[in-house]
Image: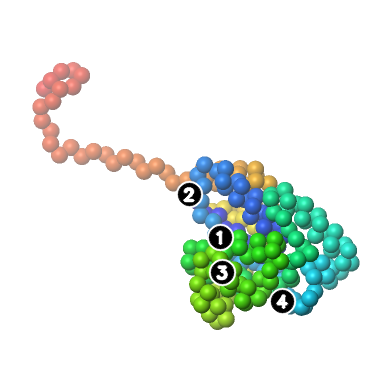
Amino acid sequence: MKVEIWSDVVCPFCYVGKRKFENALKAFSHRDEVEVVWHSFELTPDFEPIPGESSHESLAKKKGISTDEARRMGDQMTQVALEVGLHYDFDRTIPANTFLAHQLIHLGAHHGRQDATKERLMAAYYLEGQNIGDLDTLVQLGTEVGLNATESRAALRAGTYAEAVRRDEYHAQQIGVRGVPFFVFEDKYAVSGAQPSELFGEVLAKVYEEFKPAKPAKPALTVVADGDACGPDGCD
């Protein structure tokens, strides 16, 4: 069973949604049969960070509100994240463009480390205050999940996975994704937002029952020799 998830690294509900889905998956008895694929989605693809500007100031400018209001929004989001064990620190987060980060996630996927790369980048941004828009930082974070530093640096500089990011975003447009996180189950059912783990569990069960592989029928036996034998009615 395939589950595809569109999200952005700097989307606070995306990290919360990731945890809620993971909790549901842990409780799902057929979790070993579930393939999870992460897709890129940039909330603000044209974002140009201003050195020294805090995430509170950046959010205030984006939404046209005061810095105090932005800080209160961050406090509310922090409480939501705590419910799934995530300790957001908006006083330390560094506003960043995520285009390079998404490319690193695709490189991680190429080496079978997509989820680990996604998790490392989100933790670096929300919990540690690292600059995920910085090339050197991304290379270092990549090495922490087993990616080769030389390959990562070369791929990010060359934009090796830039087109892969754009394909993900084009696909999102085609299926009508308006916000993230956005979960698609077997190309048929979709869940939008950081829904409760119970709901994800229900969807996993429903989709599995509908799409689970049918047990192969036992092949009919071909009798290649027929001779004297005994049965319920006696012996021939």
Q: Answer whether residue 98 is visible to the viewer in this image.
A: no
Residue 46 disc label = 4
Residue 10 disc label = none
Position of 54 relative to 80 (above/below): below
Q: Residues within 10 Å of mark 2 (few under 14, many from 20)?
A: few
Q: Amino acid at mark 4?
A: Asp
Q: Residues within 10 Å of mark 3 (few under 14, many from 20)?
A: many
Judge from the rendering whether residue 111 lies leftward or rightward of residue 56; answer left or right: left
Residue 142 disc label = 3
Q: Circle 2 — which element?
A: helix
Q: Between disc 2 and disc 1, whose residue precedes?
A: 2
Judge from the rendering whether residue 135 lies leftward or rightward of residue 209; answer left or right: right
Q: Position of residue 61 (x, y in %)?
A: 84, 71
The residue where tag 1 is placed is: 115
Q: Between disc 3 and disc 2, whose residue precedes?
A: 2
Residue 33 disc label = 2
Position of 153 relative to 82 (above/below): below
